Image (tube, rainbow, N blue to C red):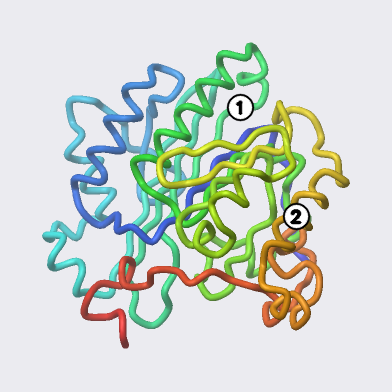
Amino acid sequence: MPLHIPAKPQIDFLLRTTKPFHHPEAAKDFLRLVLSYGPAYRPCQYGRSEPAREIFRETHLDSVLDAWLSGYGRTPEALENLPCSGQLMMRGRGPGKIRYFIAWRNWTERVLFNVIQLSLSRSFLRRSEEEMSRYVRFCDDLVRLFPPAHAELYDYVSAIPCTATENMLLPDDLSIRCPALKWRTYFGRPYVDLLGRETLLKAPCWKTEEVGDTVVVQLTGTVFEEIPPKLRAEVVEYLEESVDPEIRAQLGRGFLFRPFLASEPYDKRKKLVPVFPVREISGENHADS
């Protein structure tokens, strides 16, 4: 029996990057940004696993930094040369009910993305345009702070995979990353190099823009309305048409993006995956192993 995942009424942001997280400065920069956005973004509890029971205190951020590094307590140089991993979970109170999940890996046997995921209550964000605009600005600032290979902002209810599959586990394997097109999709350097900056900026949708080194493709004006399937298909087909005709003929339609629901099967041999900068994530000594 497949595992069915309940749809939670929240707006999610998911950032995947090959940039390293395993140093205190990354954690400090992240926490400074979180605290600068005020009470709705401030966590009250944190931990390395669920349930997160440690009390978040601004006067004791060293403890949060230690949790970010999973207690390794080593220098970034030492961590770069060790197969290790870490994760941090944080959550806040109502009405926003903010949740954070940070995961980083420095593995030699399997190279995966480092991940930042967060969510805010859907009902909280629907209170006013300013609340949703503020959330978008926060996500944009995270993109500038941690340049992603790919990031996405979307309504969890409408985008929820209906069953648990290997492809929905966090973080994703670089060799099969082929994202579905969400409400607001941030294409990082690997996708810009693959598809072309101008091609992405001219996508036939509600808005495109540059945020840091990424190009954002936003399908509609609001995240709270269902995205027309025809619109999504038009954008996908437009982007696929920018790829070399020989590649298109070899792979067939639908080679750039997986099905919208992660539970729908697809053949990864028929997908075009960008070349990701593996050296960034695995370290100088491990990149060629």
Q: Is residue 89 left or right of residue 123?
A: left
Amino acid of disc 1: Ser
Q: Nearer the viewer, mark 1 or mark 2?
A: 2
Q: Nearer the viewer, residue 193 or 46?
A: 193
| In the image, residue 155 above or below residue 149 | above
The x, y position of residue 68, in whole percent, is 28, 49
The x, y position of residue 108, in whole percent, is 33, 80
Q: In this view, does 206 lie to the left or right of 208?
A: right
Q: Is residue 257 left or right of residue 125?
A: right
**Image point (48%, 23%), residue name:** 93
Q: Is mark 2 on a helix, strand or loop?
A: helix
Q: N-terminal of the two: label 1 or label 2?
A: 1
Residue of label 2: 238
Quadrant in which the N terminus appears: bottom right
Amino acid of disc 2: Tyr
Residue of label 1: 121
Q: Is mark 1 on a helix, strand or loop?
A: strand
Q: Is residue 102 left or right of residue 30?
A: right
**In which image quadrant can residue 168 be found?**
bottom right
Q: Which of 2 and 223 is in front in this view?
A: 223
